[in-house]
Image (spheres, grey):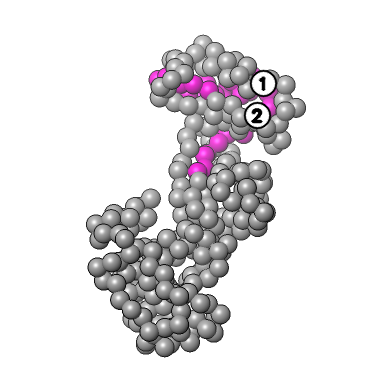
């Protein structure tokens, strides 16, 4: 079965505020930059665009809650039934329909029943409302009927570029994790270091190319930050290695309460997600 489109979902957190349009636009821009997608259709709480093979890159775009690989068909009950029976062929299942296009005559409960009966009649799958092994999703909107069975979870958070800019001091793996936390909160970053460091993981989550700036001391960090009109520096310190910095920059320590074991587990999680 060949997929035709991808449905991308983002959280309600930034959909309810006054800056909804700003957040949505930034997220769409980030998707375009990181996945080289041009044709994106925006709907409330989601976006739809043509299927592409390297879709796992979507997992690393902050602001995305989940996505699904879908098959789009005309808004015709018979056609929906035929595709549904190809997606669910065995095991147990239930059908869930979201009908945002009210011009489509068949209401969601009726479509669930009609599709469910068709699947049972034409496959080895059986209906189970409470604990199915498969959930068939149908979304009806102005662009067609979108059918899918899987929802791929992503990191959520806020789109990078919606929350200001910080300087991040990269001196170990913990500082990389601290920087990722800031990016997940929507912040853009300028990474700096006293010596060459690996920032490949940061680049995987960034919609723009990152350059590690090598500096000699705190004074150079301050000068660089003031030049960029940045007033915040992020460090990867925990309670065990907490230290004072002679600077007028505001210091953020997002990992201050984290034990080293948790830091390593989180780094592995972000690396392998």
Q: Residues within 10 Å of mark 2 (few under 14, many from 20)?
A: some
Secondary element at image label 2: strand
62 left or right, relative to 236: right
Q: Earlier in the sequence, mark 1 or mark 2?
A: 2
Q: Is residue 255 above or below residue 40?
A: below
Corner quadrant of residue 144: top right
Residue in the foreground of this view, choosing between 194 and 136: 194
Residue 232 in the image, given as x and y percentages of width and height: 48, 74
Please give the name of the residue rendered at 57% of the width and 15% of the height, measured from the top-left corner.
113
Asked if 144 appears above or below 92 in the picture, the reply is below
* Outermost residue to the top: 121
User: Hey, which residue is sitting farthest right in the picture?
Assistant: 103
Q: Is residue 202 left or right of residue 50?
A: left
Secondary structure at numbered mark 1: loop
Magenta stretch in the rendered image? 66-95
Q: Tag 1: Cα neighbours inside 10 Å, few (<14), some, or many (≥20)?
A: few
Q: Which residue is mark 1?
A: 107
Q: Residue at the spot x=39%, y=75% of the render? A: 169
The reply to whether residue 42 is in sight is yes
Residue lying at 61% horizontally and 56% vertically, measured from the top left: 23
Q: Is residue 81 left or right of residue 76?
A: left
Q: Which residue is mark 2?
A: 99
**Can residue 141 be found in the magenta stretch?**
no
Residue 207 versus residue 248 in the image, above or below:
above
The residue sitting at 53% across, 70% down in the picture is 165
Q: Is residue 219 above or below residue 249?
A: below
Q: Nearer the viewer, residue 219 or 51?
A: 219
Q: Is residue 33 visible?
A: no
**Residue 247 x/y as whole percent:** 42, 83
Query: Residues at badges 1 and 2 in contact (C-beta under 8 Å)?
Result: yes
- Per the model, the C-alpha gap separating discs 1 and 2 is 7 Å
């Amino acid at each position: 079965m060949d997929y035709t489109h991808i449905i991308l979902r983002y959280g309600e957190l930034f959909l309810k505020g006054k800056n909804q349009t700003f957040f949505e636009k930034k997220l769409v821009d980030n998707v375009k930059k990181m996945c080289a997608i041009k044709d994106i259709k925006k709907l409330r709480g989601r976006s739809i665009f043509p299927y592409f093979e390297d879709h796992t890159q979507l997992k690393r775009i902050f602001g995305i809650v989940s996505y699904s690989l879908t098959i789009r068909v005309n808004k015709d009950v018979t056609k929906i039934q035929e595709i549904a029976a190809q997606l669910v062929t065995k095991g147990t299942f239930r059908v869930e329909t979201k009908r945002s296009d009210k011009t489509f005559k068949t209401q969601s409960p009726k479509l669930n029943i009609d599709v469910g009966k068709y699947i049972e009649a034409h496959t080895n799958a059986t209906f189970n409302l409470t604990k199915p092994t498969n959930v068939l999703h149908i979304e009806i909107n102005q662009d067609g009927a979108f059918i899918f069975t899987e929802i791929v979870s992503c990191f959520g958070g806020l789109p990078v570029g919606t929350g200001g800019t910080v300087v991040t001091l990269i001196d170990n793996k913990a500082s990389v994790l601290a920087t990722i936390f800031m990016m997940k909160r929507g912040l853009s970053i300028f990474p700096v270091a006293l010596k060459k460091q690996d920032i490949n993981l940061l680049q995987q989550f960034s919609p723009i190319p990152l350059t590690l700036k090598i500096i000699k001391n705190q004074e150079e960090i301050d000068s660089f930050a003031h030049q960029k009109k940045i007033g915040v520096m992020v460090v990867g310190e925990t309670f065990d290695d907490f230290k004072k910095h002679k600077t007028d920059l505001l210091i953020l320590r997002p990992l201050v309460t984290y034990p080293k074991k948790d830091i390593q587990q989180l780094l592995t999680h972000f690396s392998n997600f």
